[in-house]
Amino acid sequence: MRILITAGGTSEAIDQVRSITNHSSGQLGVALAKAALAQRTTQVDYLIAKGAVMPPQDPRIRLHPIENTAQLGATMAELLDSNTYDAVIHAMAVSDFTPAISSSQENFLAGLNRWLTAHPGTAIDGPAFNDILADIATHTVAETKLSSKTEHLVLVLKQTEKIIGMIKRKQPQTLLIGFKLLVAVSENELLQVAHENLIKNHADYVLANDLTAIAEGRHHGYLIDSTKIVGEADTKADIAQLILDTVAKKVRQA
C-alpha cells in the first residue's frame, strides 16, 4: 500500500523576513506516519511544511519539504503525476490567503489617490480595486525587508488555490482523506460542514475536529464518510490509527 501524507502548515511570505502562517505543528502528521509504518507494506510520500515536526526516520518514508501553498501545489501535482496512491491523507493546514500587496501607508494612499483623481465621482468596486492594486504594485519598489518607518503597513491578501481539489481530478481512484477544523461550534454544525467539505472535494472521508477540543494530550475528532460517522477518537495517535485502519480495510476490500 502506498500513501501520501501532508503535514504541518504552509507559510506565505510578506517579504524575505516576515510571513503569515498558522499554528499547525505537524504532530498529527507524525502520528499518521507512525501508524502507517506499523503496517509493513506501507510506503509513504510525506509532504512536510517548513518548521513542522519531523516524522520518524525510516526508508519507507520519502520527505518532500515545501514552504508555501504554491510549492505545495506544484509538488503535489508532480507526485500525483508520477505515482499511484492507494490513499492521500491531506492533514496539512493550508493557507487560505497569500499576500498580493505589501505596501507602506504612503504608497498605498498615493495609489488610491491617483485612481480617485483619474475617476472622479466613481465608486470603487471589485474591478476598480484590482486596478488600484495593480497600480500600487507598479509603483512599489521590491524590498527584501519592508521598512518599519511607516505608521501603517498595508497588507492585501488574495485567495490561494484549493490544493485538495486537484487530488481526485488527477487520481479519481485514490482514497482521499480530508480534514475540517472549526472553532466552538456544535457537534451537528461541525459534522454538517465536514460533510459539505467531503462532497465539495470528492473526498472519501473527512476528519472533523473543533479547536476547542484540542489541547495538550487531547485531540477529539470524528471520521466521517458520505453517510455516517465511521469512528471517533480522543488523541492524535488514536485519530491516526482510526484513519489508517479505515484506509487499510478499504484497500483490502478493493
Image (cartoon, helix red, strand yellow):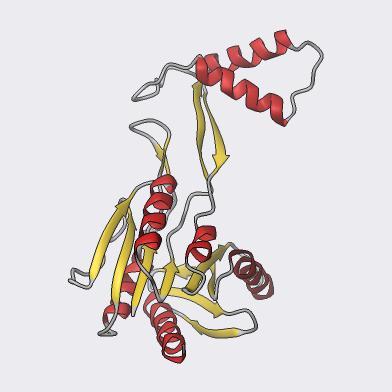
Residue displayed at 43% across by 33% down: 14
**Quick one: which residue is furthest to the right in this view?**
121
Q: Is residue 9 above or below residue 30?
A: above
Residue 17 rendering spot, x and y as whole percentages: 33, 32
- Counting every numbered tag in the picture gives 0
Q: Is residue 241 visible?
A: yes
Residue 176 rendering spot, x and y as whole percentages: 49, 71
Horizontal arrangement in the rendering, residue 188 relative to residue 102 (left or right): right
Q: Is residue 28 above or below residue 39?
A: above
Q: Is residue 58 above or below residue 18?
A: below
Horizontal arrangement in the rendering, residue 142 relative to residue 139 (left or right): left
Q: Is residue 211 visible?
A: no
Residue 215 rendering spot, x and y as whole percentages: 44, 68
Quadrant position of residue 180: bottom right
Q: Quadrant of the N terminus?
A: bottom left
Residue displayed at 39% across by 60% down: 81
Q: Is residue 105 above or below residue 58?
A: above
Horizontal arrangement in the rendering, residue 29 relative to residue 157 (left or right): left
Residue displayed at 49% across by 55% down: 163
**Quick one: which residue is furthest to the front in this view?**
82
Residue 62 rendering spot, x and y as whole percentages: 24, 64
